């Protein structure tokens, strides 16, 4: 049974067949939104962050994420990414405990503590001073009704965004504006994004933590975040606009290495139930997507990847056991990729996007 599914766009496929999969060829590493789904990638992340991408580089590696994807990328941007991942996994599994009907304040406080565990004492300064990792954090600034902190108005704003999205993703700009907080300066490959209104802001010691928190702040579930150094607007989960990062990854000859929960890509949060709204691969011509196989997912507790519904379906102890088992089982993902690399067989296993 294969634990991994591998898909590659045409440019990535050519490169892998010519050279194999090499860390020095990777230019961009995206991280998707998905909450608890990141636990299914724990073993793959540990291998990629701690072994495959651990060597010194001569060119930058651009990390971009929304929501939990930005938190994963923040782990890689620290001096010991595997330790940061371990803190994050432990905090996400064991420190998330809620009252039966938690308020937005309670959820925000709990997840703020989880983020603080990931960053540790020196995470912010390590990310900003990293010799080659360049972090990009996506948030969604509320506009119109989506800028309100009153629940009724915010609900209306979210509903309007969802309705407009049925017609066109571009309509999301009426309620949300994409912000990218980054440490790449003028070298960011995302400096020309134009599919949605986009603001770019340099990451600093004053805004990095707030940007990460905002990137995971789900509207109506958590409180909005005001980020230092930005206009007076409030910021929400970046996954509302960029759920699985169907982005133009910019020009270049290198790889976009995309460790993902699924073998498909959903552009925005409101597209999850829209079967026709799937990324067609245009933006992924130089991407290698590595995901858990269907057979691997079927071997997990309840035969699925963890998600937020588990909080309602299980008590804390049952959920913690299930999620920990997923993290343990995910070691097979990293082991399988390590074996494919050692045997030079990535090209044999990858399928065209």
Image: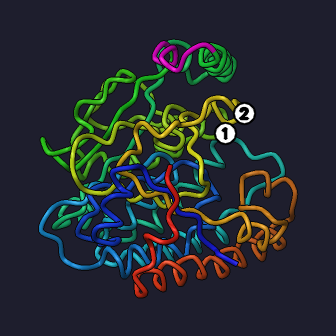
Q: Nearer the viewer, mark 2 or mark 1?
A: 2
The residue beneath circle 2 is 273
Give whichever of 140, 278 is nearer the camera.
278
Give whichever of 6, 138 is nearer the camera.
6
Q: Position of residue 174 (x, y in %)?
A: 48, 12
Seen at 52% across and 70% down, the residue is 349
Seen at 48% across and 54% down, the residue is 69
Q: Position of residue 78 (x, y in %)?
A: 31, 70
The magenta stretch spans residue 126? no
Give whichever of 210, 319 is nearer the camera.
319
Seen at 51% across and 73% down, the residue is 44
Q: Position of residue 308 (x, y in %)?
A: 72, 52
Q: Secondary structure at mark 2?
A: loop
Seen at 33% across and 51% down, the residue is 11
Q: Say which quarter of the image contains residue 132.
A: bottom left
Locate residue 94 relative to residue 255 in the image: left or right: right
Compared with 285, 260 (above or below) is: below
Compared with 123, 282 (above or below) is: above
The label on residue 221 is 1
Q: Secondary structure at mark 1?
A: loop
Q: Position of residue 101 (x, y in %)?
A: 81, 45
Q: Earlier in the sequence, mark 2 or mark 1?
A: 1
> Residue 92: in sight, yes or no?
no
Which quadrant does the N terminus fall into? bottom right
For disc 2, the neighbor class at 10 Å (few under 14, some 14 to 19, many from 20) is few
The label on residue 121 is none
Compared with 150, 88 (above or below) is: below
Locate residue 198 relative to residue 327 in the image: left or right: left
Stretch of the chain drawn in magenta:
167-174
Locate residue 135 relative to residue 283 in the image: left or right: left
The magenta stretch spans residue 168? yes
């Amino acid at each position: 049974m294969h634990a991994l599914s591998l898909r590659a766009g045409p440019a990535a496929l050519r490169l892998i067949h010519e050279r194999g999969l090499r860390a020095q060829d990777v230019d961009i590493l995206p991280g998707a939104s998905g909450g608890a789904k990141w636990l299914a990638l724990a073993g793959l992340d540990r291998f990629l962050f701690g072994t495959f991408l651990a060597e010194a580089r001569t060119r930058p590696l651009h990390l971009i994420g929304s929501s939990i994807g930005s938190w994963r990328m923040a782990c890689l941007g620290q001096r010991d990414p595997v330790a940061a991942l371990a803190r994050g996994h432990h905090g996400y599994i064991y420190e998330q405990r809620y009252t039966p009907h938690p308020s937005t304040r309670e959820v925000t406080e709990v997840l703020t503590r989880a983020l603080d565990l990931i960053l540790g004492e020196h995470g912010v300064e390590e990310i900003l001073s990293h010799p080659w990792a360049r972090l990009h954090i996506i948030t969604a600034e509320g506009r119109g009704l989506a800028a309100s902190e009153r629940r009724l108005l915010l609900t209306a704003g979210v509903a309007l965004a969802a309705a407009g999205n049925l017609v066109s993703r571009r309509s999301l700009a009426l309620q949300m504006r994409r912000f990218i907080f980054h440490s790449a300066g003028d070298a960011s490959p995302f400096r020309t994004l134009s599919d949605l209104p986009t603001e770019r802001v340099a990451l600093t010691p004053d805004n990095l933590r707030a940007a990460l928190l905002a990137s995971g702040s789900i509207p109506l579930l958590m409180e909005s975040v005001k980020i230092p150094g930005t206009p007076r607007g409030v910021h929400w989960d970046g996954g509302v606009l960029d759920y699985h990062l169907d982005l133009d990854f910019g020009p270049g000859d290198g790889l976009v290495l995309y460790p993902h929960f699924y073998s498909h890509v959903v552009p925005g949060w409101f597209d999850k139930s829209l079967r026709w709204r799937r990324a067609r691969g245009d933006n992924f011509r130089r991407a290698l997507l590595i995901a858990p196989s269907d057979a691997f997912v079927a071997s997990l507790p309840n035969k699925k990847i963890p998600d937020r519904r588990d909080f309602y379906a299980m008590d804390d102890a049952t959920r913690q056991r299930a999620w920990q088992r997923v993290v343990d089982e995910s070691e097979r993902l990293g082991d399988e990729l390590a074996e494919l690399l050692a045997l030079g067989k990535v090209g044999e296993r990858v399928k065209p996007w």
